[in-house]
Image: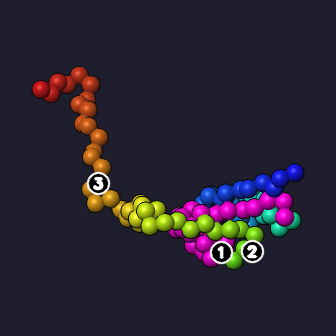
């Protein structure tokens, strides 16, 4: 039987980090499987960065776990991440104005 490979995104990493998360036990079971040599856990550092923005301390916690392999991301991904983290310079256009029923505007 081949081991299972699991990729943790920011939500699953958050569930492992937060003991009160309703999915903590399910994600922790994957960690136990990896501990037993029955699988491997991967976490893209970009996902952990996003998770740490929502739950400060998540990245450091996951980094300290022995059986999770943190995968790096390249320069292109880093540029994308920094752009996504900044507020947009141009706000979105307001929705079109809809006149009240029974009125006419040329």
Q: At numbered mark 3, what does the secondary structure look like: helix, strand or loop?
A: loop
- In the displayed structure, 54 sits above or below 22; it is below
Toward the viewer: 97 or 85? 85
Rounded to the nearest angstrom, the CA distance separating label 1 from label 2 is: 8 Å
Q: Residue at x 65, y 74 (%)?
A: 63
Left or right: 68 as drawn, with respect to 71:
right
Res 63 label: 1
* Residue range of the region highlighted in magenta in the rendering: 37-62
Nearer the observer: mark 2 or 3; the answer is 2
Q: Residue furthest top?
A: 102
Toward the viewer: 28 or 104? 28
Res 103 label: none
- Residue that carries the numbered disc 3 in the rendered image: 91
| Residue 100 percent across, percent down from the top left | 25, 29
Q: Is 20 in the magenta? A: no
| Residue 4 percent across, percent down from the top left | 78, 54
Q: Residue at x 69, y 77 (%)?
A: 64
Left or right: 98 as drawn, with respect to 52:
left
- Residue that carries the numbered disc 2 in the rendered image: 66
Res. 98 visible in picture: yes
- In the displayed structure, 98 sits above or below 62; it is above
Q: Are marks 1 and 2 in contact (CB under 8 Å)?
A: no
Rounded to the nearest angstrom, the CA distance separating label 1 from label 3 is: 36 Å
| Residue 51 percent across, percent down from the top left | 57, 64
Query: In the rendered structure, which disc, 2 or 3, sits on the residue that comes first in sequence?
Result: 2
Q: Residue at x 27, y 45 (%)?
A: 94
């Amino acid at each position: 039987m081949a081991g299972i490979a699991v990729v943790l995104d920011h939500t699953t990493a958050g569930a492992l980090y937060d003991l009160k998360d309703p999915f903590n036990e399910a994600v922790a079971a994957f960690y136990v499987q990896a501990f037993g040599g029955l699988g491997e856990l991967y976490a893209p550092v970009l996902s952990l960065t996003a998770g740490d923005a929502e739950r400060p301390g998540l990245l450091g916690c996951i980094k300290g776990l022995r059986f999770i392999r943190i995968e790096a991301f390249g320069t292109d991904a880093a540029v994308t991440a920094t752009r996504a983290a900044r507020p947009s310079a141009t706000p979105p256009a307001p929705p079109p104005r809809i006149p009240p029923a029974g009125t006419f505007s040329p």
